[in-house]
Image (spheres, rainbow, N blue to C red):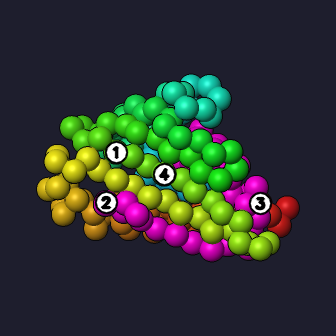
Amino acid sequence: MGNFAYGTRHTPAGNEVVWDLLVDVEHWPETFTPHLKAAHLDGRLEIGTVGWVETRFPPLRSSFVVTSVEDGKRWAWRGKLLWLTIDFDHRCEPAGSNCIITLDVNLDRLLGGPCRVLARPVYRRQMERALDLLVQTAEARART
């Protein structure tokens, strides 16, 4: 479990629908992360592929590298935001015909300490909203 933020949701949308949303980096701002202005992955989703995310507020662009991929189940990336190293893990697990979605965020231990205390409440709200939007989007897609 992340040392900064962790969240999970259950959805009747199938695992494949959720996975497609989690790996569609270019559309994150529209599908479930409206706090992002833009996001991009430079190529296929595989270990070592680089990408970036750009936040709306504050307006920052942060690069990342894919660190782990388990096709159809999880993928993780590591990036820098200002002076902090962030590890972000996206997971979806089948639960019968349903799916369990998990977002898990870690900040580097040394430099992340003060940020965890100060920024966690704000980021936690963003993560909760992102999970709710992800479930809504997945369920809408599953109905079509």
Asked where in the image residue 32 lies, by quadrant, the reply is bottom right
Disc 3: CA contacts within 10 A as few (<14), some (14-19) or many (>=20)? some
Residue 65 percent across, percent down from the top left: 46, 32
- Residue name at image x 71 percent, y 72 percent: 95
- Residue name at image x 49 percent, y 59 percent: 103
Numbered circle sitting on residue 141 = 3
Badge 2 vs badge 1, beta-carbon distance below 8 Å: yes
Residue 117 percent across, percent down from the top left: 18, 63
Residue 40 percent across, percent down from the top left: 54, 33
The boundaries of the magenta stretch are 1-30
Numbered circle sitting on residue 89 = 4
Give the Cα distance between marks 2 and 3. 30 Å
Left or right position of 93 against 48: right
Q: Is residue 130 above or below residue 77?
A: below
- Name the residue nearer the viewer: 99 or 1: 1
Q: Which quarter of the image is occupied by the N terminus? A: bottom left
Determine which residue is flagged by label 1.
86
Determine which residue is flagged by label 2.
4
Can residue 63 be seen by looking at this rendering?
Answer: yes
Q: Secondary structure at mark 2?
A: loop
Disc 2: CA contacts within 10 A as few (<14), some (14-19) or many (>=20)? many
Residue 7 sits inside the magenta stretch: yes
Three-letter amino acid code at disc 3? Arg
Asked where in the image residue 123 lies, by quadrant, the reply is bottom left
Give the Cα distance between marks 2 and 4. 12 Å
Three-letter amino acid code at disc 1? Ile
Give the Cα distance between marks 2 and 1. 9 Å
Mark 2 / mark 3, whichever is N-terminal: 2
Give the Cα distance between marks 4 and 1. 10 Å
Give the Cα distance between marks 3 and 1. 30 Å
